[in-house]
Amino acid sequence: MPDKYDAIGRGYTGPRQPDPRIAGTIAAALGDAQRIVNIGAGSGAYEPAGRDLMAVEPSAEMIRQRPPTAYPAVQASAEDLPFADNSYDAGMAVLTVHHWSDQARGLRELRRVTRGPVVLVTFDPAHSGNWLDGYIPGLRQLDAGQMPPMDFYARWLGAVAITPLLIPHDCLDGFLYSYWRRPECYLDPHLRDAISSFHALGGCEQELALLARDLASGDWDAQFGALRSCVELDVGYRLVVASGPG
Ligand SMILES: C[S@@+](CC[C@H](N)C(=O)[O-])C[C@H]1O[C@@H](n2cnc3c(N)ncnc32)[C@H](O)[C@@H]1O
């Protein structure tokens, strides 16, 4: 059966380049782990170099976009990992948990196959205050429905440390709230196409017409222009690091 990302993942790697600052944070959280499993690996973003890494990705289209030099990938889902218990020193899963059909089962699987740290990048659905939500109110509802609350992770992974992942103003990875200081980017359909929330909400053209109007009139800058001098911001993304099972 074709995977959701076989359709929405086409052209992903253009606007979705790994950001080196976020990559550094993830690599530091993985420590010196050598054998790493990356779940929902997509086209290979944030896979640290010089390790022994196995990517897990259900979408053939996303696997197709992995560069020839990328680590090997197996076509599988988080909920049913084709590995023995404790096969890996560490696990990672970046901006993917919200897509899993059974998030508890996927996290249990990740814990089962990993003997050391598990590193996740996700979004806190309790975070509020992103200006984009004022234009597209459906985003809060979408996130509430698909993003696990922060207390979910400890239930399946054991002790976790959760810290805000600040997003640089010029983030190379064009995920949903990455354009917090570049509002014009949301008016570019090519950039929106690489963001699953816009697919889920049906494009949001009407809502974005209001943003276009406010940018043209100067109203956006009158309300939010102070952001244009911020270098990084907490827009709700979180680094979740579970230590080993003990
Ligand atoms: C937003 S992309 C993130 C890809 C990559 N981790 C990155 O940071 O660029 C989400 C990925 O999760 C994958 N995915 C969706 N459902 C999944 C599941 N049940 N198990 C594992 N991966 C899944 C999608 O196919 C897609 O490649």
Image (tube, helix red, strand yellow):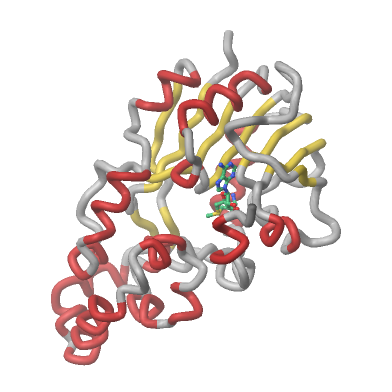
Residue drawn where x is 33% and y is 53% of the image: 235
Image location of residue 140, percent across then percent down: 25, 53
Up-down: is 37 above or below 181? above
Image location of residue 144, percent across then percent down: 28, 45
Image location of residue 229, percent across then percent down: 31, 70
> Most extreme residue toward the right, as rendered?
69
Q: Nearer the viewer, residue 164 or 118?
A: 118
Q: Nearer the viewer, residue 27 or 101?
A: 101
> Most extreme residue toward the bottom, as rendered?
216
Q: Nearer the viewer, residue 151 or 197?
A: 197
Up-down: is 82 above or below 181? above
Residue drawn where x is 72% and y is 43% of the image: 55
> Most extreme residue toward the top, as rendered?
246
Image location of residue 215, percent across then percent down: 24, 85
Q: Total number of numbered labels?
A: 0
Residue drawn where x is 50% and y is 48% of the image: 95
Q: Image quadrant of residue 116? A: top right
Q: Quadrant of the C terminus?
A: top right
Residue drawn where x is 64% and y is 30% of the image: 80
> Most extreme residue toward the front, as rendered?
1
Q: Image quadrant of residue 169? A: bottom left
Q: Image quadrant of residue 214? A: bottom left
